[in-house]
Image (cartoon, helix red, strand yellow):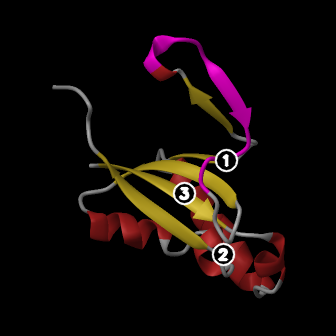
Amino acid sequence: MKFVTIGYGNREGYDRTDEAVRDEAHAHDERLRAAGVEMGVAGEPVQVRNPGNTGTMVDHGPFLRATLPVAGFAIIEAESLEEAIKLVSNTPCAVAHGVVEVWPLESAQG
């Protein structure tokens, strides 16, 4: 199964986390990347709309608002939701006073 993860966190939470905990979280990310997880830092988003195929409109900024900014994304493969949760539970956003959302990615192919 594939999962999309969204990590939320800010500098304040990161800075107040013990340096050894942060270092281990970054090492955990490196192990995930070495195992094939596609991971990246979030850039500035845009919203794209094309209502009724009448013309594309682009607005800068996120559509959804959260108490913490989006820090990054990953696509992971796991046998179950429980395994996916275990894989992300030691990432920087999870341990540095942020949060990681785990979304099952269901195939859109018929």
Over which residues does the magenta segment extend?
Answer: 52-64
Q: Position of residue 108 (x, y in %)?
A: 26, 31
Give the residue at x 24% y 62%: 80
Q: Give the camera-side residue of 59 and 19.
A: 59
Vertical comparison of 31 with 62: above or below? below
- CA–CA distance between discs 2 and 3? 19 Å
Q: Give the camera-side residue of 10 and 65.
A: 65
Per the image, the residue denoted by label 3 is: 6
- CA–CA distance between discs 1 and 2? 30 Å
In magenta segment, residue 24 = no
Answer with left or right where residue 30 lies relative to residue 5.
right
Q: Where is residue 97 in the image (x, y as percent from the top left)?
A: 67, 81
Name the residue type under label 2: Glu
Vertical comparison of 47 with 68: above or below? above
Give the residue at x 42% y 61%: 102
Element class at badge 3:
strand
